[in-house]
Amino acid sequence: MITQRVHRDLARAISAVENRIVPLSAARATLAAQGHTPAAARADVVGITGPPGAGKSTLADRLIEGLRAAGETVAVIAVDPSSPFTHGAVLGDRVRMQRHAGDVGVFIRSMASREAGGGLAPATRDAVRLAEAAGFDVILVETVGVGQIELEVVAVADCIVVVTVPALGDSVQTIKAGLTEIADIFVVNMADRPGANRTAVELKHMVHEGRRDIPVLQTIAQDGTGVAELLKAIGAYRRAEAGNTGRAVRFEVMRRARDRAALAAAALLDSPLGAGVFAQLSAHQIGRNDAVDTLLEMLGGPVHAH
Amino acid sequence: MPIKVLVTKPGLDGHDRGAKIVARALRDAGMEVVYTGLHQTPEMIVTAAVQEDVDVIGVSILSGAHMTIFPKIMSLLREREVDDIVVIGGGVIQEADVPKLQALGVREIFNAEATTQQLIDGIERVVAEFGRDRARRAAASST
């Protein structure tokens, strides 16, 4: 059961991993020791992504409303951008969701994106897992306003809702390359604005050219129009596919493998072995390409990536 | 780790230019600022502060309702068993009320003439003096 104490302890657990004070496993152990256990084995995680100002937070607010009406508890992790210059951030997503403040079945946490560049914060995935461990049924993850290639939400969410709005110039352009490949559901929000139908039709055409059959829905988050259909589409997706696509697993393994490879490479470059290669390079005994090949060989992988 | 601050405006007082300027200034000072917007009840403020696990709640009040709002915030925090979030206030608050608010546990009151730099310095000071030590808290709760 979700209580005020769950809120407090979950919030503190998220801070502890967000600030790298303890690892995820320790934070989860603490939650368990505090008596917080999930009702179900896993939560369904719904990602909400799309360009800035598309109405992601307002839509999240409507989804909370619908999910609560269906008796499900909801945690929201909403990410806003950090300044790359001062590292400060203004986190304003919860402004659109505050009518749920009196409902203990709703937990909303903002996260600054900090140094991460993929549309989430470094600890978003951990925060989702902690919310799951604390017993929430559904977790909504709202990304920062994204362009085309901030796709980290794939590693976190089972079902991804890509939100766009009419008349973003050539509207489909803004969500073309990467985002269209990760969408499980498209939403054209602010559907009362001119051009909504055209945007939806363009998206449908694009979907039909692709491999998967992705719903393209229209909503007006502001007044709730179309939200019931969106909830139905999310529900159908949860029943059919949640967690079974392997997509999140692939993405996460690739990401961590890259991190590991980068760490190994950095260690080699800083090692005496690496220094030896750099010495040869600066003594003009070997050329730049030879140095690269030698170092890659030392790493143990194939010299040429392709 | 950055200081996390809730900037909030309770009650009926209907403009938030000042609070937005404050939010921006704190951001530019490297803080993570959760901005709640206008018309917050003490319940909403405390719920947001707990969920966000902020270091500081900064309450902007110009309406004169501070002697009802602050006691409510402080008692809700106690009710939720949260004792390590620092509460500060700013806006139009009569000199005579400042000691009363301090007695309630409000750590700092900034008047309307305070500069944003004084605010930033003040927040850094109260966090250093009264704020939680997150590392110690995490270690204590895991044992």
Image: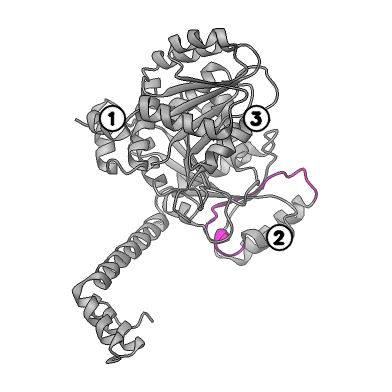
Answer with left or right where residue B136 lies relative to residue A111: left
Start-end of magenta stretch? A176-194
Confirm whether the magenta stretch covers residue A180: yes
Snapshot quadrant of residue A135:
top left
Residue identifier under label 1: B137
Answer with left or right where residue A137 lies relative to residue B91: left
Q: Is residue B112 above or below residue A19?
A: above
Single out the mark in the foreground, 2 or 3: 3
Q: CA distance from mark 1 to mark 3?
A: 33 Å
Question: Are discs 1 and 2 both within one chain?
Answer: no
Check contact, mark 2 vs mark 3: CB within 8 A.
no
Callout count: 3
Element class at badge 1: helix
Element class at badge 3: helix
Residue identifier under label 3: B18
Residue at screen point 41% across, 24% down: B85
Q: Which mark, residue A152?
A: none
Q: Which mark, residue A202?
A: 2
Element class at badge 2: helix
For disc 2, the chain is A
Q: Amino acid at mark 1?
A: Arg
